[in-house]
């Protein structure tokens, strides 16, 4: 607990400063997180000996973030993803011909780490590059991190009913509700700040609703990536941050929250 609080004390101000910098700063951070996530997932499922597949997925993760930052046309993105898939098919066959174990589960991990995770994280870059992006980007970051803290403390204080005991024994229904409430309250307070300090006509109902949805999805993302850890018998994906684990341990909820915010803010205009 002490190490988690120390990381938060130093990390939160740094994140705030980073988000206020030009969009390229966030894009570089997301590139780093995406590439590190590829390695962590390959290492977790003991597939990191497949170096060519690992390198291919890292390049794909990097390319997706670059495409998001420069807002490339969908045809170029589709072409790049198709090329990734063709090369991955070729590697899959080649590994089998060389009698190096590379089953369908490894192929699925490559698709997941090389396409799904970076595509979801690229939503952060798209939000930051959008109109009012400097304000939008605080929505997924704030709701995910505040929701995580709300789940932790409400679970410790009121947790009685297990949420998913086989997947994450410490998670409780009360903790999940705490995440939803705290994320929603964060958005309501954020709405008031935007109104008072920046004269933005933020809709408090829309903001509160987005916060509640993000709080719920953050818990779902955390549980989904906990399933992988349970299946492969690991505690953390890495040791990047003391008390927090690796990049995937810290940003697993962002993988579900960021694309949800991108979708919701295009449907329900928050301001």
Image: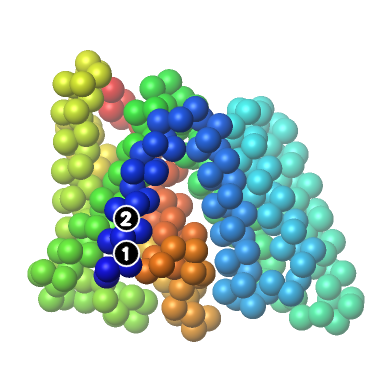
Left or right: where 186 falls relative to 80: left
From what the image shows, is residue 110 above or below residue 181? Answer: below
Secondary element at image label 1: helix
CA gap between label 2 and label 1 equals: 6 Å
Q: Residues within 10 Å of mark 2 (few under 14, many from 20)?
A: some
Q: Is residue 85 left or right of residue 12?
A: right
Q: Which residue is mark 2?
A: 8
- Residue under the image location 68 percent in, 55 percent down: 58
Does residue 86 appear to the left or right of 164 in the view shown? right
Which residue is identified by label 1? 4
Q: Residue at x 46, y 25 (%)?
A: 130
The quarter of the picture where the N terminus appears is bottom left
Mark 2 falls on what kind of element? helix
Q: Say whether residue 224 is visible.
A: no
Residue drawn at (79%, 47%) of the image: 83
Does residue 121 appear in this view? yes
Q: How many callouts does the rendering have?
A: 2
């Amino acid at each position: 607990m002490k190490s988690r609080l120390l990381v938060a004390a130093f990390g939160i101000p740094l994140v705030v400063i980073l988000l206020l910098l030009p969009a390229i700063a966030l894009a570089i951070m997301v590139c780093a997180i995406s590439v590190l996530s590829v390695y962590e997932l390959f290492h977790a499922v003991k597939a990191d000996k497949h170096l060519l597949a690992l390198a291919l997925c890292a390049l794909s993760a990097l390319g997706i973030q670059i495409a998001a930052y420069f807002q490339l046309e969908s045809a170029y993105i589709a072409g790049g993803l198709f090329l990734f898939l063709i090369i991955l098919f070729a590697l899959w066959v080649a590994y089998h011909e060389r009698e190096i174990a590379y089953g369908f589960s490894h192929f699925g991990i490559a698709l997941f780490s090389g396409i799904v995770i970076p595509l979801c994280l690229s939503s952060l870059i798209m939000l930051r590059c959008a109109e009012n992006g400097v304000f939008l980007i605080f929505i997924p970051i704030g709701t995910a991190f505040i929701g995580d803290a709300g789940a932790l403390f409400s679970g410790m204080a009121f947790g009685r009913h297990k949420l998913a005991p086989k997947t994450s024994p410490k998670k409780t229904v009360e903790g999940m509700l705490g995440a939803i409430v705290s994320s929603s309250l964060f958005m309501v307070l954020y709405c008031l700040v935007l109104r008072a300090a920046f004269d933005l006509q933020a809709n408090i109902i829309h903001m509160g609703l987005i916060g509640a949805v993000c709080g719920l999805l953050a818990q779902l993302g955390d549980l989904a990536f906990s399933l992988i850890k349970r299946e492969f018998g690991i505690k953390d994906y890495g040791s990047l941050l003391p008390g927090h684990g690796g990049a995937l341990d810290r940003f697993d909820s962002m993988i579900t929250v960021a694309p949800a915010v991108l979708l919701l803010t295009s449907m329900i205009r928050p301001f």
